[in-house]
Amino acid sequence: MDTGKDTHMSLPEKKLASFIDDLASDSPAPGGGSVAALAGALGSALAAMVCRLTIGKKKYAEVGEEMKSVLSMAEDLRVKFLHLVDTDTDAFNKVMDAYSLPKDTDDRKALRNAAIQAATKEAALVPLECMKHGIDALALARTVAQKGNINSVSDAGVSALMIGAGIEAAALNVKINLTGITDTDFVAWKSSDVASILRTGREATDEILSIVEEKISA
């Protein structure tokens, strides 16, 4: 089986099995950051599915327009998450490129260090963006759990779990990149962002799962 990386082809153009083969290979990218974004895309896709299974149903006529709005937002987030799958890999590759710059003179060492710092900041910001999109996606999962087709409420729960997992995974990728950044103000700022988003994401996920469990048990 060929497990060589092909970073020129985006995830939407690849079969899932091929992407998983890439993950399992000995190359570090795509890696956890791309998986975090994929989890967000899967969760958003499930939210969109619940919307589609609700829209047009007589029993849910009162929420039909709201579900159409949620569907549009879920599809938009799905596209954004899929884009981040590749963006995360690209950001990692830029860090590796920076580390490969020459350092045989003091000037070149300075340029190399500056390039590493800039690339590492970008590599931290990509999963942070994924986390922020995750909060938006959880809001949609909450709506479909509350108002969507009851027969698909478990899918709303899985949507929340996938999005929540994506947020948690993305947080790890932000944190590991922050360890390589010497700008203490930047590190403190982004660490605060991570902690805040994690709290919000965990609370939202727990709330959605409570809604789902209640509806399943009713």
Image (cartoon, rainbow, N blue to C red):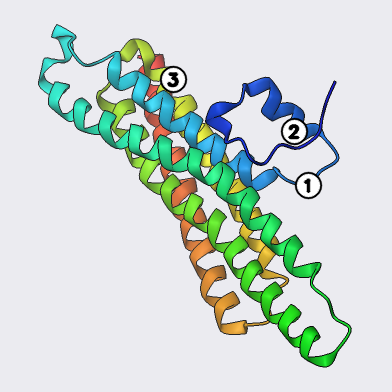
Question: How far across and how far down the image is residue 150, in percent?
Answer: 31, 14
Is the residue marked by circle 1 packed among few (<14), some (14-19), or many (20+) residues within 10 Å? some
Q: Earlier in the sequence, mark 3 or mark 2?
A: 2
Q: CA distance from mark 3 to mark 1?
A: 32 Å
* Crowding near the residue tagged with mark 3, few <14, some 14–19, many ≥20 C-alpha atoms within 10 Å: many
Of 90 and 200, the residue lying toward us? 90
Q: Earlier in the sequence, mark 2 or mark 1?
A: 2
In the rendered structure, the answer to whether residue 76 lies left or right of residue 176 reads: left
Image disc number at residue 155? 3
The amino acid at mark 3 is Asp
Q: Residue beneath label 1, please?
A: 28
Q: Determine whether, in the image, residue 121 is placed left or right of residue 96.
A: left
Quarter occupied by residue 186? bottom right
The crowding category of the residue bearing disc 2, from other C-alpha atoms within 10 Å (few below 14, some 14 to 19, many at least 20), is many
Quick check: can you spot residue 215?
Answer: yes
Q: Residue at x 30, y 13 (%)?
A: 53
- Outermost residue on the top side: it is 58
- Look at the numbered disc 2 and give the secondary structure of its residue: helix
Quickly name the residue at label 2.
22
At x 28%, y 21%, the residue is 148
Residue drawn at the location 38% of the way across and 39% of the way down? 77
The residue at the point 71 percent across, 63 percent down is: 95
Residue 100 picture quarter: bottom right
Q: Quadrant of residue 142?
A: top left
